[in-house]
Amino acid sequence: MEDSKAKKAPKKSWFDGLKSEFRKIIWPDKTDLAKQSIAVVVVSVVLGVIITIIDFAVQYGVNFLVK
């Protein structure tokens, strides 16, 4: 049986690969980040309202059937 450590690549090469991948990242500027953050908050609020409306409708329907 071979040692499993012998098959692994050295950690230094993994970290070098990680560093090179991080250099490829294009970070957004402040205006893009603000726009995207606002979009996430708006979509979250809208989905929360939709889920609340559906919840009240289902609750009303169940209460109507039970009574």
Image (cartoon, helix red, strand yellow):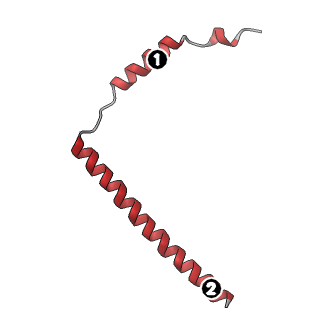
Q: Of the residues under marks 1 and 2, which one precedes in the sequence?
A: 1
Q: Is mark 1 on a helix, strand or loop?
A: helix
User: What x and y, as percent, mark residue 51?
Assistant: 49, 69
Quadrant location of residue 27?
A: top left
Residues packed near mark 2 inside 10 Å, few (<14), some (14 to 19) or many (20 plus): few
> Does residue 46 lie above or below 2 as drawn?
below
Q: How far apart are marks 1 and 2 (CA)?
A: 59 Å
Lateral position of residue 58 relative to residue 40, left or right: right
> Does residue 7 lie above or below 57 as drawn?
above
Mark 1 residue type: Phe
* Residue drawn at 60 percent across, 13 percent down: 8
> Does residue 9 lie above or below 61 as drawn?
above
Question: If the image is split into quadrants, where does the C terminus sit?
Answer: bottom right
User: What x and y, as percent, mark residue 30?
Assistant: 23, 42
- Residue 63, numbered circle: 2
> Does residue 6 lie above or below 15 as drawn?
above
Q: Is mark 1 in CB contact (under 8 Å) with mark 2?
A: no
Q: Spot the residue most to the bottom.
A: 67
* Residue drawn at 56 percent across, 12 percent down: 9
User: What x and y, as percent, mark residue 34?
Assistant: 26, 49
* Residue drawn at 41 percent across, 60 percent down: 44
* Residue drawn at 69 percent across, 13 percent down: 4
Front one among 49 and 7: 49
Q: Spot the residue most to the left.
A: 31
Mark 2 residue type: Asn
> In this figure, which residue is indicated by the disc labeled 1?
15
Lateral position of residue 32 relative to residue 66, left or right: left
- Residue 30, numbered circle: none
Lateral position of residue 54 relative to residue 62, left or right: left
Residues packed near mark 1 inside 10 Å, few (<14), some (14 to 19) or many (20 plus): few
Question: If the image is split into quadrants, where does the N terminus sit?
Answer: top right
